[in-house]
Structures are given as C-alpha cells and as structure tokens.
C-alpha cells in the first residue's frame, strides 16, 4: 500500500488504507482514488508510476471501523517509518496532504486549525510545498457541496502543478 521511488517529485500523503484497498493491496483502488485522480488530472498508469508519484499513507494497514467510518491511522506507523521513508525521497517538490492526519504531520503551525481552515489557506501552505486537501471519499460529498470554492480555486491549481511536475 506504499509506493515510492527516489525520482518521485510528488508525494500523496493519505490517511490509511480503507477495507477495500486493504483487500486489494493497491493504494487508492476505490472510489476515493477515482476522485483523487480526477482532481489531479492523471490516469491510473501515471498515478501508479512510483517514479512520478510516491504514495505513503500515515498508517500502513486498515485500522478498522469506528462509529462514523474508519478509525484513525495507527500512530506508530508514522512515528516509526515516516521520517526514514521521506529521507528516501530527495526530489519531492509537492506534498498532497490528504485529510486531517496527514495535514497534522505535514502542514506547519496549524495544529489548531480545522481541516477546512487549512484547505482555505492552501496558497500559504503551497508556498511551503504542501497542498492540504480534504479526503476524496464519497463520504465528503457534503463538505464539497458546502465549500464550492475548493473546486473553483484549488483544483485548477492542483492540476496545473501536477502537470508541471510530471
């Protein structure tokens, strides 16, 4: 569920694999991945090319189901492996921090901000090489409807940056 190569210039930092992805063994092999690829303007071949895109979630295994969806990623995964994996990616120019757990790790000085606030401040974070994104899960359809600025402002910039870095 992890893919990376030293040549990768883009990192997708997600949460943890969901049940379907856990079973397939392929990151973002679900409707969330379909939406994310659409947001990025890439096809599956480019998405799964580790020389173009590194995919390193905050947790490496399916954490189980909670009251309102999947449980948070297990903290020991990021604490144990994240820094050493990132050290193997010297060419990173853009980190897509998907969801609150990835954002809490990669987005500086925003621990008190909500996910919506971090995503609204996308331009400031992008200057640091990080683009905070909501999770592309169908469960976030309500968030996307309530925040139409995301599609209008953020997605065109995301597609442009991805095209430049590939």
Image (tube, rainbow, N blue to C red):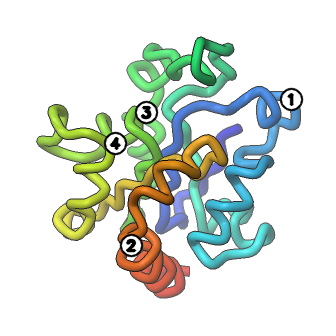
Q: Which of 113 and 131 is in front in this view?
A: 113
Mark 2 vs mark 4: in front: 2
Mark 2 vs mark 3: in front: 2
Q: Mark 3 points at which residue?
A: 82
Q: Label 2, label 1: how many angstroms apart (C-alpha)?
A: 32 Å
Q: Label 2, label 4: how many angstroms apart (C-alpha)?
A: 16 Å
Badge 4 crowding class, 10 Å Cα cut-off, few under 14, some 14 to 19, many 20 or more, is many
Q: In this view, does 24 lie to the left or right of 108?
A: right
Q: Label 3, label 4: how many angstroms apart (C-alpha)?
A: 13 Å
- Give residue 56's position: percent from left, percent from top: 55, 43
Q: Name the residue under label 4.
A: 103
User: Which numbered disc flags the more N-terminal residue, 2 or 4?
Assistant: 4
SS class, disc 1: helix
- Give residue 109's position: percent from left, percent from top: 12, 42
Mark 2 vs mark 1: in front: 2
> Which residue is pictured at 36% across the width and 71% down the height?
149
> Which residue is pictured at 30% across the width and 44% down the height?
106
User: Which numbered disc flags the more N-terminal residue, 3 or 1?
Assistant: 1
Q: Mark 1 points at which residue?
A: 23
């Amino acid at each position: 569920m992890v893919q990376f190569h030293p040549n990768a210039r883009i990192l997708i930092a997600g949460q943890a694999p969901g049940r379907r992805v856990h079973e397939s063994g392929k990151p973002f092999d679900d409707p969330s991945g379909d939406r994310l690829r659409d947001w990025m303007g890439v096809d599956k071949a480019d998405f799964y090319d580790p020389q173009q895109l590194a995919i390193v979630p905050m947790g490496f295994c399916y954490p189980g189901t909670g009251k309102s969806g999947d449980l948070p990623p297990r903290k020991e995964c990021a604490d144990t492996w994240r820094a050493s994996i990132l050290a193997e990616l010297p060419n990173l120019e853009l980190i897509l921090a998907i969801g609150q757990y990835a954002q809490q790790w990669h987005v500086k000085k925003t621990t008190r901000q909500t996910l919506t606030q971090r995503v609204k401040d996308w331009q400031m974070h992008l200057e640091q090489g990080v683009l905070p994104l909501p999770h592309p899960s169908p469960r976030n359809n309500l968030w996307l409807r309530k925040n139409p600025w995301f599609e209008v402002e953020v997605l065109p910039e995301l597609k442009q940056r991805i095209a430049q870095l590939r």
